[in-house]
């Protein structure tokens, strides 16, 4: 992994304004889907975006791939500002940044053969001219499919195999960054592991960077180097995986980790502390003032409603005069507090 | 809700105005000369033609004609014809070139005939279409289902005018099983009976598509999770089908129904023509034949108003049926 | 009408004996004839659900876990489904029973909570009315009393301001609130059996925890039997007493939930557990089960899992390929049954785990 920054996102916003009639009044409202987030992804690095519905993780992936245009903020890819590029200027970005979708059933055209699905991106970008078929067979082999199945249609494949085709399509143009939006959540448990292992293998062999959007905390922990926890359009905690999972400081991260059911309970290893949040995630239309999590937070005080907490270096880092382990750990809470007892401690005999 | 209706009405008005302007330009600025229709070319001296044109006001600049027409709609206007001045009060649609009657009278006197025919036909196609559609959906895959679907396809495949002509010819004219059209002035009962034949054939043919809409919509609804939930409550199957399935299945059909009724209200050209029903559709065809511009304009405006109003009614009705639809 | 008869406290749970078998499914097969052939969704399935206990039925898509439970409530179209075997609910045989029998037992003896509360509640009817309707179908009461009952049920499942909420439509509820309303609907007639089909899969993580807690609490209060259908083994670990693991329409392992998850004794259960990523520990590589579940149109011969099983070589002869393994107790473990030909599955699997 080199230290070269691939993607730099600064204060990114995406607002969807709309009008609504309430009684006799016409009300203007705004969905603040993404509301000022910043992060970086280095070459070969994997960033996990986690959060619940309405947190803006999918909108973020659409913005980064420039399938959607930000309301404010900037996106730099390899040092080039791509925030407001026009479609014809995005050609290079379309090649360097690829997407893998959640649903392998609806993201492949059922009337095209696998061969034509994988040849199209090659032709669009003028790659491997005259040797497209050979390249497609290489790709199929790379993702663990039989190269002889080049003339089959998506319906002849199982869900896991279709997701492999989706991965092959993303890899066809040799991208540098892959945005994977819930790539395994539609798959059966026994297939998820196969696809996760394939992604990990490709990441290491091809030195790919990933933005990995998922709600499954186990999958994110397994796959990512860094994690950004999102809540209602904001990043509330961001840092190296180990810090986020083992010493979270933001109450929402803590609640999220605590709420995820843990298989280790069956092995008699239960987490020492349990946090249960009350209620559902509020609507991203006119979210709560100040800290957005305050309506469900057990620590909330007056200041939380008045001031929005900034994303700053986490307590543990400050108390040790910063960066003891050199790792990244930021959080956005007025009253941060490390909790380490939220997930079961698994001892490995080996 | 109120503000929504007001906004929609304002929008409706602008649609009607736009229709009016484009229709006016289309007909009045067209190269055809209505005076010719009144005075056939071969026997018409040019001075006579000019005289007619002048009396119709067609010799004046287009802008002036339009302004007069437009103001007539809102404040009324005066017509001078053969030395007499006739006031035509708002909304004035002018006078027929051909009959010299007020267009308002021409259209409004015929409107009830069209309305009653439309309502009778709608009763037939909604009843027949929805009942057969539900029956087919509930018995999906059985012989009854195939019979209903097959019949509706056959009915839909034969050209409508052929069926209408057959009905007009055999039961009405030759066998006298069903009475012919008679105006409302000769008794309401006879009038209704006279509309039976056209309403039946129009309704039956239209019902074919309603059978298919209802069947498809009902099948889709019955496969929904909430119908399974309803069934799992232990309520009678009848309640599941009607309280839970039917109501949801009907909401998409409401839209089609509203538009279909709107089209029927603007006059069913073929049906009225074949069965001799003196309605809007028949009068409009006459007007086209004789290039009777004021009547054509009046009929176009009326059509626009009816369609826009029906659309509004459909949308409001939709919001009453489906609580998720908010009027905004 | 005195108020006491209208409250939720009218409970039969007191008479229930914990551990009593409410649902006894034996040798159940469910098949759907299609144009491509017979889809054998469930084959020779046997299990029991007991009062006061939660049975988790675990499996992937196509394992037959939902199909078998829908058969309990008779929710399959009888014209397009072939059901054989026996389903005894509270002593009443349901296979081959007429529609009127199912109408009586639905909601009163067995109720179901479905996966997606958004699509499972009728969008045009008010929440209160949907719950009251189920109560009125089985109790001769006025609309007002049924409505009152609905409000009480909403209160019971933790919906704030139930009086107002009862008069709202499903789209005005959040996802978690809708699932609470579904649970209220399921419990309105005090059924002895509640079947929850992936009740939290469509919900957010923090809300999922609330709903699972609620189901657990209500079960303690009502003493009913709960069948939890899920693909999520972590959910099972935290909520279930007993477990039945299904693969390709058959049960393959059953026993105490915690014991099975801590020490699986059938290769499929073992493989599933090995393949899970964990949010509480770092793993180098996930140990995936190779291949994909078989088509239900054309099940493999012998043990359905054999094409994906890495231990089939350790069974002498070709038993895995030709013989369907019968249920048998796992050697060396009490209260555990498996369908597997391995002579000593515990030792075989332990050896494999140690080798990794």
Image: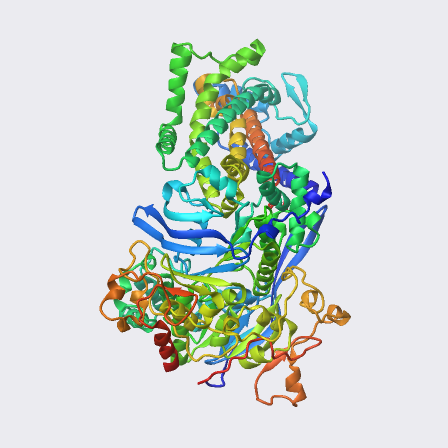
Report which quarter residue B262 is drawn in. top right
**Position of the C terminus of chain A by quadrant:** bottom left
Report which quarter residue A170 is drawn in. bottom left
**Position of the N terminus of chain A by quadrant:** bottom left
Taking the image as shown, residue A69 lies to the left or right of residue B6, namely left
Taking the image as shown, residue A323 lies to the left or right of residue C197, namely right
C46 w.r.t. A6: above or below: above
Measuring 57% from the left and 52% from the top, which residue is drawn there? C16
Picture mark count: 0
C269 w.r.t. B118: above or below: below
Q: Is residue B270 visible?
A: no
Q: Could you say where residue C55 lies in the image, as x and y percent from the top left?
A: 49, 59
Q: Is residue A208 visible?
A: yes
B327 w.r.t. A151: above or below: above
* Front-most of residues A304 and B158: A304
* Front-most of residues A173 and C161: C161
* Front-most of residues B269 and A242: A242
Taking the image as shown, residue C302 lies to the left or right of residue B55, namely left
User: Looking at the image, what colour scheme do you see?
Assistant: rainbow
Q: Could you say where residue C155 lies in the image, as x and y percent from the top left?
A: 67, 52
Q: Could you say where residue C96 lies in the image, as x and y percent from the top left?
A: 40, 41
C68 w.r.t. B70: above or below: below
């Amino acid at each position: 992994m080199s230290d070269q920054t691939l993607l730099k996102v600064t204060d990114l916003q995406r607002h969807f304004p709309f009008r609504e009639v309430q009684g006799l009044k016409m009300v203007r409202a705004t969905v603040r889907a993404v509301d000022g987030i910043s992060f970086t992804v280095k070459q070969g690095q994997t960033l996990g975006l986690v959060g619940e519905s309405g947190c803006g993780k999918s909108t973020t992936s659409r913005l980064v791939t420039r399938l959607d245009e930000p309301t404010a903020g900037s996106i730099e890819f390899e040092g080039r500002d791509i925030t407001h590029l026009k479609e014809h200027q995005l050609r290079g970005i379309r090649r360097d940044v690829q997407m893998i979708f959640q649903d392998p059933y609806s993201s492949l055209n059922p009337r095209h053969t696998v061969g034509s699905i994988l040849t199209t991106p090659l032709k669009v970008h003028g790659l491997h001219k005259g040797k497209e078929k050979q390249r497609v067979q290489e790709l199929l082999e790379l993702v663990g499919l039989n190269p002889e199945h080049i003339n089959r249609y998506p319906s002849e494949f199982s869900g896991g195999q279709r997701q492999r085709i989706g991965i092959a399509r993303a890899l066809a143009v040799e991208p540098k960054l892959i945005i994977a939006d819930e790539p395994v959540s539609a798959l059966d448990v026994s297939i998820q592991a196969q696809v996760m292992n394939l992604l990990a293998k490709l990441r290491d062999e091809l030195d790919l960077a990933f933005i990995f959007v998922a709600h499954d905390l186990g999958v994110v922990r397994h796959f990512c180097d860094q994690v950004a926890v999102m809540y209602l359009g904001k990043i509330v905690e961001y840092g190296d995986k180990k810090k986020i999972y083992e010493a979270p400081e933001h109450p929402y991260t803590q609640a999220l980790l605590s709420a995820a059911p843990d298989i280790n309970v069956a092995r008699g290893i239960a987490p020492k502390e349990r946090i249960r949040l009350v209620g559902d995630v509020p609507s991203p239309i006119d979210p709560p003032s100040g800290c957005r999590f305050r309506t469900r937070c057990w620590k909330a005080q007056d200041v939380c409603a008045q001031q929005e907490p900034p994303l700053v270096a986490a307590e543990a880092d400050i108390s040790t005069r910063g960066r003891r382990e050199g790792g990244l750990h930021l959080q956005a809470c007025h009253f941060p507090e490390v909790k380490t007892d939220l997930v079961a401690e698994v001892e490995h005999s080996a | 809700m109120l503000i929504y209706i007001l906004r929609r009405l304002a929008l409706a008005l602008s649609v009607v105005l736009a229709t009016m302007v484009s229709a006016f330009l289309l007909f009045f600025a067209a190269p055809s000369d209505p005076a010719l229709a009144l005075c056939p070319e071969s026997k018409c001296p040019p001075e006579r033609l000019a005289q007619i044109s002048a009396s119709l006001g067609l010799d004046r600049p287009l802008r002036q004609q339009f302004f007069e027409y437009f103001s007539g709609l809102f404040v009324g206007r005066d017509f001078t014809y053969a030395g007499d001045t006739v006031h035509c009060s708002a909304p004035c649609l002018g006078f027929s070139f051909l009959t010299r009657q007020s267009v308002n009278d021409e259209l409004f006197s015929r409107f009830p005939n069209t309305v009653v025919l439309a309502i009778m036909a709608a009763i037939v196609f909604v009843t027949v279409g929805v009942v057969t559609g539900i029956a087919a959906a509930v018995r999906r895959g059985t012989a009854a289902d195939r019979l209903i679907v097959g019949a509706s396809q056959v009915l839909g495949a034969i050209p409508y005018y052929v069926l209408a002509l057959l009905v007009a010819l055999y039961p009405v004219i030759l066998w006298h099983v069903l009475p012919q059209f008679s105006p409302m002035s000769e008794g309401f009962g006879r009038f209704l009976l006279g509309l039976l034949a056209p309403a039946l054939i129009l309704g039956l043919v239209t019902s074919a598509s309603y059978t298919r809409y209802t069947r498809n919509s009902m099948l889709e609804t019955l496969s929904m999770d909430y119908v399974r939930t309803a069934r799992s409550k232990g309520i009678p199957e009848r309640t599941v089908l009607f309280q839970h399935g039917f109501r949801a299945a009907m909401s998409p059909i409401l839209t089609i129904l509203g538009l279909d009724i709107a089209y029927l209200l603007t006059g069913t050209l073929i049906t009225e023509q074949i069965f001799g029903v003196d309605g809007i559709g028949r009068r409009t065809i006459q007007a086209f034949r004789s290039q009777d511009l004021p009547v054509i304009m009046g009929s176009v405006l009326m059509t626009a108003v009816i369609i826009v109003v029906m659309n509004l009614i459909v949308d409001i009705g939709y919001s009453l049926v489906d609580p998720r639809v908010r009027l905004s | 009408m005195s108020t006491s008869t209208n409250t939720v406290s009218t409970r039969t749970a007191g008479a229930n004996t914990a551990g009593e078998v409410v649902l006894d499914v034996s040798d159940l097969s469910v098949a759907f004839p299609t144009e491509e052939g017979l889809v054998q969704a469930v084959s020779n399935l046997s299990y029991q659900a007991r009062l006061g206990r939660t049975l988790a039925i675990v499996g992937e898509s196509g394992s037959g876990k939902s199909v078998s439970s829908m058969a309990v409530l008779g929710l399959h179209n009888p014209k397009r489904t072939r059901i054989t075997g026996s389903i005894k609910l509270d002593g009443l045989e349901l296979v081959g029973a007429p529609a009127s029998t199912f109408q009586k037992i639905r909601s009163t003896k067995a109720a179901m909570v479905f996966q997606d509360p958004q699509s499972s509640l009728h969008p045009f009817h008010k929440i209160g009315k949907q719950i009251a309707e189920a109560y009125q179908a089985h109790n001769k009461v006025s609309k007002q009393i049924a409505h009152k009952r609905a409000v009480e049920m909403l209160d019971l499942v933790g919906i704030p301001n139930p009086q107002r909420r009862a008069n709202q439509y499903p789209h005005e509820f959040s996802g978690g609130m809708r699932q609470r309303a579904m649970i209220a609907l399921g419990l309105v007639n005090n059924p002895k059996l509640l079947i929850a089909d992936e009740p939290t899969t469509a919900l957010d993580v923090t809300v999922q925890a609330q709903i699972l807690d609620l189901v657990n609490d209500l079960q303690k209060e009502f003493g009913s039997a709960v069948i939890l259908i899920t693909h999520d083994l972590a959910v099972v670990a935290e909520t279930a007493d007993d477990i039945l693991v299904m693969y390709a329409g058959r049960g393959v392992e059953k026993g105490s939930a915690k014991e099975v998850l801590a020490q699986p004794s059938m290769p499929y259960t073992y493989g599933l557990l090995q393949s899970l990523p964990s949010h509480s520990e770092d793993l180098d590589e996930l140990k995936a089960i190779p291949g994909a579940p078989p088509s239900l149109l054309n099940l493999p011969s012998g043990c359905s899992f054999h094409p994906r099983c890495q231990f089939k070589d350790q069974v002498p002869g070709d038993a895995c390929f030709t013989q369907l393994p019968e249920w048998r107790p796992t050697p060396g473990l009490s209260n555990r049954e498996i369908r597997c030909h391995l002579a000593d599955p515990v030792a075989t699997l332990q050896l494999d785990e140690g080798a990794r």
